[in-house]
Image: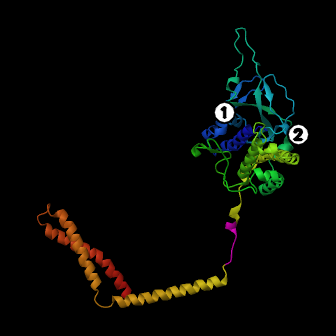
Amino acid sequence: MYLERAYRQVAFVSYGNKYLSGSIDSEILDRHPLIFTHFPILRDLEYGTLLAGSASHTINHFKIQGLDKISLHFSSELLPPLLDSKIFYFNVSEYSFCIVCHFPNQIFKVLIHVDEKPLWQEYDENEFPLQSDYNNYHESVENYVLMDISPEFTDKILADLHPISWKSFYDDYQNKVYNFEISKRYGTFPVPLTENNCYEGNLYKKEEQFPLLPFSLKRNYASNLIINAAALTHAFNVESHSKNEYAAYWHMSENEKKEFSKANQTLDELFPILLKHSANHYQDSALHTQRQLHTSFATPSKIIENSLDDSINHSNINDTENIQSDEKTSGFNWFGLIKFLWFMLWCYCALWALAYFTVHWGNIFVFAIAFLYALYKILPKSDKQSDKSI
């Protein structure tokens, strides 16, 4: 399995269905880092001509024909191993993927990744090619062709789309992959479930990273399993690389090397299945922690009694405070008079400084304004105290 292309196909299917439903626009689909650097183009199977030049153009090309959705499947399960074409080589290895296009009335067609054969061009009498040569762009594009598939594979396609239990798959992944001690040494066990998505792009610039699965996804099984499997795959590859002469792998015993190979093979078998499920069922992989929000609960009688006692005590405290405030408000309120004079003096000084040089009769004007301001500040307090005395 070519992991980088598999990632691109997962992004193409997941974001492509979002684009097909109108949830995202073409820029989000075409500018995805995985798709933008190796954007898929649709070629004619017989003549090799260009039919669509991007992911969104490809989907629009099929949408006119009634496309409902796209899904990810293993090429070897839907297509024969030997396909003949004068223009293309077909990638139908054991763990390679193909994209199935769903049309009305359960009509399925498959998008298969192909590599262009060298020197397939035919030339006219003037030595000009009869078809466009796309080999110059092989590093930035991925060629796809649309093929019909036999109706006998309908059940297999529908079986891949049957809902799965992500919790069971999560447990099965841990039981099989981490059944080997060598996996626990190089991987992370138990698999943490802390991430919302797995990201691709510039690892040093977070703003240039883009989620592999649609960004509306919350904390889920699929992303965390992909992160774990990718990290363990990378660790196995680095450890067993022939040029890594300082790796511990070359100093292992024969039994340890056999265990290493079995663990690596088990991961190689489960990782493609994980990617297929992630592309087709990522919407169902969210962790269902919100179930606790819907659980009803009963309030214990002791808590109710304590809350009633607290409310009674609180009312008693309020009553005593009201009695004390009534006692304080009885008699002449010297504090209110002092506060009134202070506000009047403060406002008088402030306004006099402003109006002294502009109004000849500024003293009377400022005194009047200060008097009104002091009344304004003191009257609400008097009203509140009068209310309390009542």
Q: Nearer the viewer, mark 1 or mark 2?
A: 1
The percent position of residue 131, horizontal first and vertical second, equals 71, 19
Q: Is residue 22 above or below residue 382?
A: above
Q: Which residues are magenta?
A: 292-298
* Pointer 2 residue: 152
User: Few, some or many C-alpha atoms within 10 Å of disc 1 (few <14, some 14-19, many ≥20)?
Assistant: many
Q: Nearer the viewer, residue 137 or 256?
A: 256
* Picture quarter with the N terminus: top right
- The residue depicted at 77 percent of the width and 52 percent of the height is 185
The percent position of residue 75, horizontal first and vertical second, equals 82, 37
* Pointer 1 residue: 54
Q: Nearer the viewer, residue 193 or 54?
A: 193
The magenta stretch spans residue 294 = yes
The percent position of residue 290, horizontal first and vertical second, equals 68, 63
Q: Nearer the viewer, residue 178 or 199?
A: 178
User: Few, some or many C-alpha atoms within 10 Å of disc 2 (few <14, some 14-19, many ≥20)?
Assistant: few
Query: At label 2, which amino acid type do we have?
Result: Glu
* Picture quarter with the C terminus: bottom left
The magenta stretch spans residue 91 = no
